[in-house]
Image: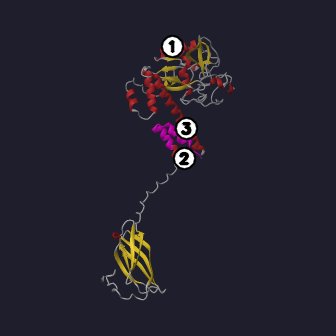
Amino acid sequence: MNGAGIFGEPETPPGQRLPERQLSEVTLMVYGATWDAERSVVRLQAEATTAFSDGTAGEGVSVGFFLNGRKLVELPTDDFGLAMLDHEVPDEEFVAGQNTLVLRVKGFARQVAQTFDAEPPAPPPKPQPAPPPVAKTPSVPEQLETARRLIEQDRDYQQAINVLEQLRGLSVLQEMTRTQLLDQARGLLNETNQLGLLLKQMGNQADRRGLAFVVDAYRRLIPPDAELDQFASTLPSVPAAPQERVLTNSIGMKLMWLPPGLYQKGDPPGVTTLIAKPFYMGIYPVTQAEYRKVTSQSPSHFKGNRRPVEHVSWDDAQAFCRRLSQKDGKTYRLPSEAEWEYACRAGTMTTFAFGDRLSPAQANTSESGLGQTSDVGSYPANAWGLHDMHGNVWEWCEDAYDGNCRVLRGGSWYFIATRAASAHRHCNSSGNRGRNFGFRVVCEFA
C-alpha cells in the first residue's frame, strides 16, 4: 500500500529500485539552546551531517528538524554534507528538563534524534544591599566629648570609663582631660554603688531624715527612676542649699556650707560613712582675733591676729562654742570626727586632700621648716574651699577617743606630714593645752 512519507511525499512504490547511492552516515549534534528572557525565545543551534555509502559527502540532501514533534525548518545540506540549524523558538515550546530534537532525511527514510536539556536560566541574583558604610572612627576630641556627655547627661559612668580607657595617642592636654574625666567617672560610679548599697542597708526603718538625704543624693547620680521618685515623695523634704554657700557671722568668721553625703572612712578608705545632715564648717581654724572677740582672752604662744588660736584645750573650745552660740543666736559646736574627715577629704579617696603625698607647699608641717604656726589661709584650700585641714594646728573634735581623751585631727606644724593624713587620728586629755592644739567650729544648718 502506497503511503505518504515523512515529508508528505509518496513513498517509493513496491518493487521500484532504490537509488543507487545510499546514505551511510547521518548524525545530529545540538550544541546550543540559549534562552533570551527579554524576548521569550530560545535560540536553538544544531548541526546535521550526511554522507553517502560511496564515501562522498551527502551534498544536496534535504533534512528536516523537528522539536518535540513539531517541525521547525527544512534545510539542504551543503557541499560538505552539512546543514546548520540556527533557529529561534518561542520558549513555551520547550518543556522543563529534557527536550528532543529529531533529524529526518528526505527521500532516505532515515532519522536520528538527540535529547538535550533546555532549562530556563536561573533568575538573576537579587541585588544585595550595599554593605553599610564603615563607621568613621570618632576623633579623640569627639570621644572625650562623648565621655563627658555620658557622665554629665546620661549618668552612665561605666560606659564613660570604657570609652576613656580605650583612648590612645593623646596629646598632653588631651591626656590631662582624659585623666580628669576618668577620675570623675570612677568617683561617681563608686559613690553610686556605695549609695545603692547603703540604701539597702538602711531600709525603710532607718532615720527618715537621713534616708531622705541618701535617696536625694542617689537620685542625682542615676538616670530617672520612677519607683525611686515615688519612694522619695514619702520621705521628709531635703532642705535646699543656701543661695550663699559662705556664711559670715557676727564676729566676721567665715564658714562654708557642706552638703550631706558619703565618704570612705579610714586608711586605706573602706568604710562607707553617711553624713546625713548639711552643716557649715569654718573655712579656717579659729583665729586669735576671733577667739579674743568671744572670750577676751589671748592664750596663744605664737602671736598674730590671723594665726590660729593655740594653747587651748578641748574644754576651752567647748566654752568658746557656747559663748559664740549665745552671741550669734546660732548653734555652734566642734565637728564630729566623721564630719571633720568628710570635710577634709572633700570627695577624695587619697591619703591627703591633694593626693597621696603632701608637699611643704601644701601645708605647714615639720617638713616646711617654719617651726611655728602660720597665718590661716597661707596654703591652698581643698576642693571644698577649706584651708589648713592638713597641718598648722591639731584640731579638736567632739568625739571621745578613749576615756577622758578627746580626738584631734589634721596634724600640725610640729609633726611630720604623715600625721596630717585625712584619716590619721590623734588624742589628748580634754583639759590639756599645747602650742599645736587649736580647733575650728561647725554651725548647724537649720
Spatial CA distance of label 2 from label 1 is 57 Å
Task: Please name the amino acid that badge 3 sits on.
Answer: Leu
Rendered-image quadrant of the C terminus: top left
Spatial CA distance of label 3 from label 1 is 45 Å
In this view of the protein, which residue sits in the foreground, 267 or 53? Answer: 53
- Are dots 3 and 2 in contact, CB under 8 Å? no
Q: Tell me what residue is drawn at x 50 percent, y 28 percent.
A: 194
Tally the marks. 3
| 31 lies left or right of 6 | right
In this view of the protein, which residue sits in the foreground, 347 or 244? Answer: 347
Task: Please name the amino acid that badge 2 sits on.
Answer: Val
Magenta part of the protein: which range?
A: 145-168
> Where's residue 102, x and y in %?
39, 75
Task: Please name the amino acid that badge 1 sits on.
Answer: Arg
Q: Badge 2 local density, few (<14 within 10 Å), some, or many (20+)?
A: some
Rendered-image quadrant of the N terminus: bottom left
Q: Is residue 77 above or below residue 326?
A: below
> Where's residue 260, x and y in %?
48, 25
Counting residues from the start of the chain, the first of labels 3 and 1 encountered is 3
Q: Tell me what residue is drawn at x 51 percent, y 39 percent.
A: 160
How would you classify the magenta stretch by its main secondary structure?
A: helix
- Are dots 2 and 1 in contact, CB under 8 Å? no
| 410 lies left or right of 105 | right
Q: Is residue 357 above or below residue 28?
A: above
Tell me if residue 155 is in the magenta stretch.
Answer: yes
Counting residues from the start of the chain, the first of labels 3 and 2 encountered is 2
Residue 182 circle label = 3
Location of mark 1 (residue): 322
> Where's residue 323, x and y in %?
51, 14
Q: Tell me what residue is drawn at x 53 percent, y 33 percent.
A: 187
Residue 215 makes an appearance in the image:
yes
Spatial CA distance of label 3 from label 2 is 14 Å
